Image: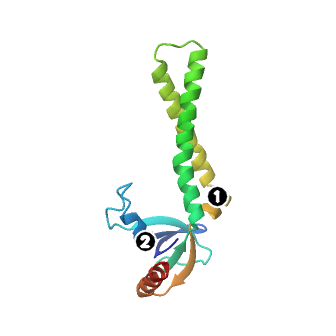
Amino acid sequence: MKQCGQIIQLMDDTAKVKMQRHSSCAGCNACKMGATEKPIELEALNPLMAKEGDWVEVEMDNQHVLSAAFMMYMIPLLFLIFGVLVGHVFLEAIGIGEFQELLTAIIAFLFTALAYLILNRSEKKKSFKEKMLPQIVDIVDTPEEIAAALMDENETNK
């Protein structure tokens, strides 16, 4: 998946890129973000050493998009379910009958929080960034060039 945007901030080996939402966001509305025309900001690897203010083309492999979505949604859900099962079995084994449902819910939410802590920690690793972050693949001269490239890409996808 390729998108174009403008670099608004440089970081170590990445850059924050401001871009318009992808056309596939418009029809989804699952997160209600596609309902607005507000631009999005994302972090992308910057191997071309583009500078702040440069217009760039950003690409992320579709497989990595799906992997990132799986990690951010399914892993916490699995930890939540596992927390419910562990909480229920553990509390039953030690003989806590009163408030068992409440304590099970607390344990499940603690497991979910643990999942997000693990994901947050792995996100900071360099190998994770290299695999999962989008990458700047080209520096373009003008926004008009971006519009022309997007129109060409849309015509070839038909």
Tell me the element at label 2. strand
Where is residue 139 shown, x and y percent of the image? 53, 82
Q: Nearer the viewer, residue 10 or 78?
A: 78
Where is residue 57 shown, x and y percent of the image? 51, 77
In this picture, is 120 found above or below 112? below
Q: Residues within 10 Å of mark 1 (few under 14, many from 20)?
A: few
- The residue at which mark 2 appears reads as 19
> Of all residues shown, which one is farthest toward the front?
158
Where is residue 78 shown, x and y percent of the image? 56, 40
In this picture, is 5 found above or below 145? above
Residue at 64% over, 64% down: 130
Looking at marks 2 and 1 on the same chain, the residue that comes earlier in the sequence is marked by 2
> Of all residues shown, which one is farthest toward the left?
36
Q: Is residue 133 visible?
A: no
In this picture, is 31 found above or below 19? above
- The residue at which mark 1 appears reads as 128
Q: Is the C-beta separation of discs 2 and 1 under 8 Å?
A: no
Question: Label 2 is placed on what type of residue?
Answer: Met
Q: How many marks?
A: 2
Question: Label 1 is placed on what type of residue?
Answer: Phe
Residue at 55% over, 58% down: 66
Q: Is residue 112 visible?
A: yes
Residue at 56% over, 56% down: 68
Residue at 56% over, 65% down: 62
Q: Residues within 10 Å of mark 2 (few under 14, many from 20)?
A: many
Identify the mark at residue 58; answer none if there is no mark: none
